Amino acid sequence: MNRTELYSVVVSLVLAAGLMGWIIWSQRPPEPVAEVVGAAPAPTRAEAPPSEDAPEPLPIDEDRAAALRAAADEGPDDAQVRVDLGNLYHQARRFDDAIPWFEAALALSPDLVEVSTDLGVAHYYAGTVDRALAQFDRSLEIDPAHAATWLNIGIVRAFGRQDLAGAIEAWEELQRLAPDSLEAFAAADAIERLRAAHP
């Protein structure tokens, strides 16, 4: 497993941990309200609490960022330096800054499935759920069995769309395609908790 694949797995597992936190949070009793008018709306992604297990964003090493930007200027055909810049901003949770670098890398090397999936994650956290899911579809065109992509599809469906059935469907497909992967174990746990919380 190379560095990019490892990073993709870590990001996916952090997102899965966030999902676990949201599932547990959603089981708490509702707060009393003075008046109830109709059904309560489904929780939105913004209402999902961050996982206690989620790592703090890494601070940007501005010297490294400047060196990478200079290398990108000097190497207009260098996809890797653009991936490195995207990862730098992604790890700092500066998703709007990561997106153009991932897009530039994919313009040069369209078959980088991990980068495509990381771009989808960045779109999701930047607040564009439809673009995230569309990017994940692109990842599956590159590799239909890419475990991190299937895990993230489930997470975005659950958080971004409040489509719990769709999330479970994605995670079950992940378990079918990559049953021994770390992502499949995270998906199995997510399905179990989701079904316990929302029978």
Image (spheres, grey):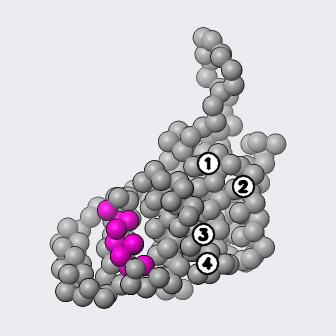
Residue at the spot of label 1: 161
Q: Considering depth in this image, is 83 or 138 the residue closer to the camera?
A: 138
Question: Which amino acid does the dot numbered 1 rest on?
Answer: Arg
Q: Give the crowd class for mark 3: few <14, some 14-19, many >=20 residues within 10 Å.
A: some
Question: Which amino acid does the dot numbered 4 rest on?
Answer: Glu
Residue 166 numbered mark, or none:
2
Give whichever of discs 1 and 2 has the lower sequence position: 1
Residue at point 69% right, 25% down? 39
Residue at point 46% right, 59% down? 123
Decide: is 180 above or below 35.
Answer: below
Q: Which residues are magenta?
A: 97-106
* Alpha carbon distance from label 4 to label 2: 19 Å
User: Can the viewer see residue 127 in this picture?
Assistant: yes
| Residue 91 x/y as whole percent | 38, 65
**Left or right placement of residue 170 versus residue 115 in this view:** right
Residue at the spot of label 4: 141
User: Can the viewer see residue 14 in this picture?
Assistant: no
Residue at point 47% right, 82% down? 110
Q: Give the crowd class for mark 2: few <14, some 14-19, many >=20 residues within 10 Å.
A: some
Q: Are marks 3 and 4 in contact (CB under 8 Å)?
A: yes
* Alpha carbon distance from label 1 to label 2: 9 Å
Give whichever of discs 2 and 3 has the lower sequence position: 3
- Whether the magenta-drawn stretch holds residue 98 is answered as yes
* Alpha carbon distance from label 1 to label 3: 16 Å
Q: Quadrant of residue 147?
A: bottom right
Q: Nearer the viewer, mark 2 or mark 3?
A: 3
Q: At numbered mark 3, what does the secondary structure look like: helix, strand or loop?
A: helix
Give whichever of discs 4 and 2 has the lower sequence position: 4
Residue at the spot of label 3: 137
